[in-house]
Image (tube, rainbow, N blue to C red):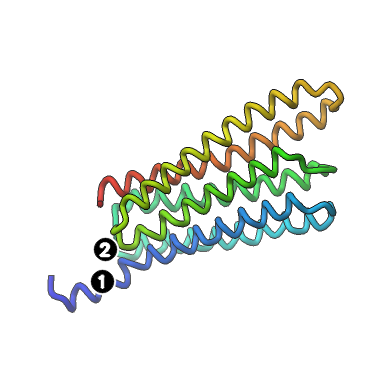
Amino acid sequence: MSSSFSRFFTPKDRVFYGLFEEVTNTLKEMSQLLYSALQQQDISLRDEQLRQLESWEHKNDQTTHQIFIELGQNFITPFDREDIHALAHSLDDVADYMWSVGKRIFTYHLDSVDATMIRMAEVIIKCTGALHDAVHELRNMKKIKTITDCCVAVNSYENEADILLDESISSLFSNHSITAIELIKRKDLYEELELVTDKCEDASDVIESIVIKYA
């Protein structure tokens, strides 16, 4: 392939990296916003911050849609089309489920946020941070260990969230002063927060698969 022919395709080829990086930048912003909202004592201000997650989720939908448009228009891609689709879909799931958490909190009219929710949000921040770092290294594929270490970290964080979920639900059911309705609300929120970390792990598994194929 001539150098001029290569240069013609290179920008189209590499546009995917920028789009995926934009997605993980959005995920980091969303996780930090979620954490900040959960620490907000004023319920109206908390709900206002949580509703901002919807704008970020819509922004992420637009970026994900652009990835699929580029996939349909470009002959040259940095890795298999199936892998691009899988990575875009898995990262989009992370944004969707973070927004789902926000919706549940203000829909349930939760009076207070407990320590479990804040700790889960902290784990989500760590997960999205690791995904961000892994995706930003895909552009050059020069730091394979950095990418795999990030993926291993996400798996570890997801395990941390699993343990936290089990302990929190056990504590919840041993609390005889809580009402049945409040118990249902909090159990659902714990599980939804943990599900965000599951989606982060799904995305990290796709990244690991890409690295194995192309490193």
* Apparent side of residue 48 relative to residue 198 in the rendered image (left or right): right
What is the residue that sits farthest to the bottom in this orientation? 4
Figure quadrant of residue 167 = top right
Mark 1, secondary structure of its residue: helix
What is the residue that sits farthest to the left in this orientation? 1
Residue 162 image label: none
Q: Which residue is mark 1?
A: 9
Disc 2 to disc 1: CB gap under 8 Å = yes
Q: Earlier in the sequence, mark 2 or mark 1?
A: 1
Where's residue 205, x and y in %? 40, 42
Report how far apart the C-alphas of labels 2 and 1 lie in the structure.
7 Å
Where's residue 159, x and y in %? 52, 34
Q: What amino acid is labelled 1 in the image?
A: Phe
Q: Residues within 10 Å of mark 1 (few under 14, many from 20)?
A: some
Residue 76 image label: 2
Near-viewer residue (122 or 92): 122
